[in-house]
Amino acid sequence: LNYRHFEDDAAPFKYVEAGFARLDKVLSHCERHGLYVILDLHSAQGWQNVHWHSDNASRISLFWKVAFYQDRFVALWREFAQRYKNRAVIAGYDVLNEPSANNALGDYPWNVGPNYRPNFGRMNAVYRRLVTEIRKIDSRHIIFLEGDDYARDFSGLEKPFDDNLAYSSHNYTVPGFGPGRYPGTIHPRSAAAGGAQDWDLAKQERNFLDAEGTKFTQQHNVPLWVGEFGSVFNGPANESGDRLRALDDQIGIFESHETHWTTWNYKDVGVMGMLTLDPASPYMERISDLLRKKVALGTDDWMKWLPPTPVKHATAQLADQIRQVVGDPQLDARLNVRCMSQTLLCFYTGTLMQPLYASLFKGLSENELDHILSSFSAKQCVPNQGLVDVLSKYMAMPAQGSSTGG
């Protein structure tokens, strides 16, 4: 969910009925098909993190330091609770996706990766206030809380203070992204990952058991839901089987440790989805040239598994030149490149391309737009059959203890 669908920044605390009508339609559709829904707020007022996936084009986060945004956030969740407290189709509320409470001014080498320092004082205060307000209205639904640092750090999270709390971690792994063979040697390109790494089932299990979310929920004997994880399928075509094997092992580990899970994601434009848009669909054909430019410019900077392009090489060189002139020995070279690439390619260059994207649809009639958007219809999409097979294997299994599949 994006708060913008339910509230206008120009009219805070007044709610947009069209957004709720759309959500109601989705809930009714899920009821008909026997699916549970977890309401998951990916974009909060003032932005809970500094990345693009919180619908943040500014690279700053105002949420954690500005009471006004927290007030609006709490009020919106009260509205959700009031409207949906009696809806059995809703399994629970994941109140804040991938929060990052302590880098309000953006990502820099001193506050990302191994240098990030969580702020659980801020986070715990917001969570306790929010849960208290929701419980005044809705005592039935599960409330899911995520850790700091994008749902990875639970080290200072307040111990469970409500009878119906569960916790959500995100567990993306090196073998799920590649490139490289699994089981075998992976050659990650991200600044945080370092050099070549050997991965197999045993290492995946150690990685899961060492995760902060796993340790927190085991310590307090509360449910863990891995709300996001997955493999990518837009890397080397001959490695798709490796990504599937990594995912298969990962889900098997979740099941063996009675951990709830939901893979990310179920439909996209050909990166991680169980369903992907047909490359020959009207939408994909219309944006094909734009997509080629995005790859060349590296605007999807988070896709570290893709081969670097000349633009990315040049950005890395510029970042290193700047670091050398600054002359601060505390600046980590790899993290500096990571932050520069994100700022220049994802935010600045990506924003430069927005008018070009919009122009592709300028002047089209409603019927023409509907025809293009029909590309997203499930019946028009192409299944990733390998991923379907892996997920189907676990969907067909009886739950182990309290375990449930995605």
Image: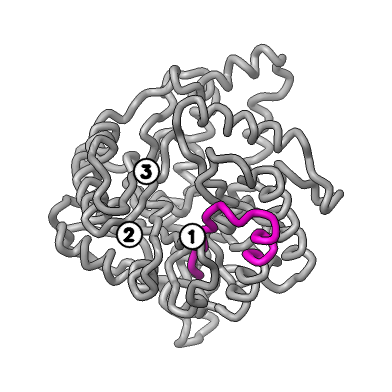
Determine contact: label 3, label 1, CB under 8 Å.
no
For the record, the magenta segment spans 130-148
Residue closest to the eye, 23 or 113:
23
| Amino acid type assigned to the residue bearing label 1 in the image | Thr
Query: Residue 388 sits in which quadrant?
Result: top left
| Amino acid type assigned to the residue bearing label 3 in the image | Gly
Mark 1 residue crowding within 10 angstroms, few (<14) / some (14–19) / many (20+): many
- Mark in front: 3 vs 2: 3
Residue 109 % position (x, y): 50, 75
Q: Is residue 106 left or right of residue 247?
A: right
To which residue does mark 3 refer? 406
Quadrant where the N terminus lies? top right
* Residue 187 against residue 19 in the figure, above or below: below
Q: Is residue 8 left or right of residue 255?
A: right
First along the sequence among labels 2 and 1: 2
Q: Is residue 50 magenta?
A: no
Q: Is residue 344 visible?
A: no
Residue shown at 42% from the left, 61% from the top: 169
To which residue does mark 2 refer? 189
| Element type at mark 1 | helix
* Residue lying at the far right of the rendered structure: 11
Q: Is residue 143 left or right of residue 213?
A: right
Residue closest to the eye, 325 or 28:
28
| Element type at mark 2 | loop
Residue 141 % position (x, y): 55, 52
Residue 373 % position (x, y): 58, 22
Residue shown at 60% from the left, 56% from the top: 139
| Element type at mark 3 | loop
Residue closest to the eye, 403 or 56:
403
